[in-house]
């Protein structure tokens, strides 16, 4: 079955500059680099994403929306981080909806590639992830080794860089902006 077979393939994909998880302990874990910048596992999510040149628009939006403070907290989060190019392709949106859009990119809890593959497999090929905004992101396989994330509008993003481990969670770099659909909801509390 492709879903179960992809379990090891995603976490040990070439080009990530990271040794397989089974070969090292958490204290010596090496993260993939983002645009030539080292991502350090002892930093928080906001510190690591701020070091990435390809995420300056995301960092500005997180700060402008007030969501950045949560990514410095001791909570555990998974962030689906769109690149500057993905932000540009999505176009400009109103400041009034910025906090909602940024919270939609954050899932409470830690979902590295292994955990995503596990929940996809357990859910029969398509896992629903509740965002901090209160909406749903859908994770499923896109081929034997790639995870696709779909938003409520039906738009899909591929994870381009997996498993950037941070002190308070995980970052996955995505190639498209994910957007909430429907009316505003109560933000999830964690």
Image: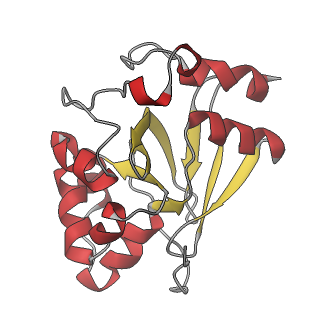
On screen, 48 above or below 94?
above
Coloring scheme of the render?
A: secondary structure
Q: Is residue 179 visible?
A: no
Q: Is residue 74 left or right of residue 83?
A: right
**Residue 135 x/y as whole percent:** 58, 72
Q: Residue at x 41, y 62 (%)?
A: 74
Q: Residue at x 44, y 61 (%)?
A: 105
On screen, 39 above or below 36?
below
Q: Quarter of the image for the C terminus: give it.
A: bottom right
**Residue 157 x/y as whole percent:** 48, 45
Q: Residue at x 55, y 87 (%)?
A: 186
Where residue 166 sits, quadrant-wise, is top left
On screen, 8 above or below 84?
above
On screen, 22 above or below 83?
above
Q: Is residue 59 visible?
A: yes
**Residue 170 x/y as whole percent:** 45, 45
Q: Is residue 39 left or right of residue 100?
A: left
Q: Nearer the viewer, residue 180 or 59?
A: 59
Where residue 103 sits, quadrant-wise, is bottom left
Q: Quarter of the image for the N terminus: give it.
A: top right
**What is the tally of numbered marks visible in this picture?**
0
**Residue 150 x/y as whole percent:** 57, 53
Q: Residue at x 26, y 66 (%)?
A: 62
């Amino acid at each position: 079955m492709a879903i179960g077979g992809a379990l090891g393939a995603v976490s040990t994909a070439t080009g990530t500059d990271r040794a397989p998880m089974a070969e090292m302990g958490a204290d010596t874990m090496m993260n993939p680099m983002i645009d030539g910048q080292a991502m350090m596992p002892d930093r928080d999510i906001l510190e690591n994403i701020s070091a990435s040149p390809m995420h300056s628009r995301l960092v500005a939006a997180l700060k402008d929306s007030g969501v950045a403070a949560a990514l410095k907290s001791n909570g555990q989060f998974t962030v689906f981080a769109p690149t500057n190019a993905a932000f540009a392709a999505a176009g400009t949106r109103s400041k009034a909806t910025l906090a909602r859009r940024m919270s939609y990119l954050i899932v409470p809890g830690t979902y590295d590639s292994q955990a995503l593959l596990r929940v996809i497999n357990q859910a029969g090929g398509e896992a629903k992830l509740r965002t901090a905004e209160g909406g749903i992101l859908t994770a499923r396989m896109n081929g034997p080794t790639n995870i696709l994330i779909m938003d409520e509008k039906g738009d899909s993003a591929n994870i381009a860089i997996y498993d950037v481990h941070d002190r308070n969670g995980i970052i996955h770099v995505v190639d498209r902006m994910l957007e909430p659909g429907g009316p505003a909801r109560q933000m999830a509390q964690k």
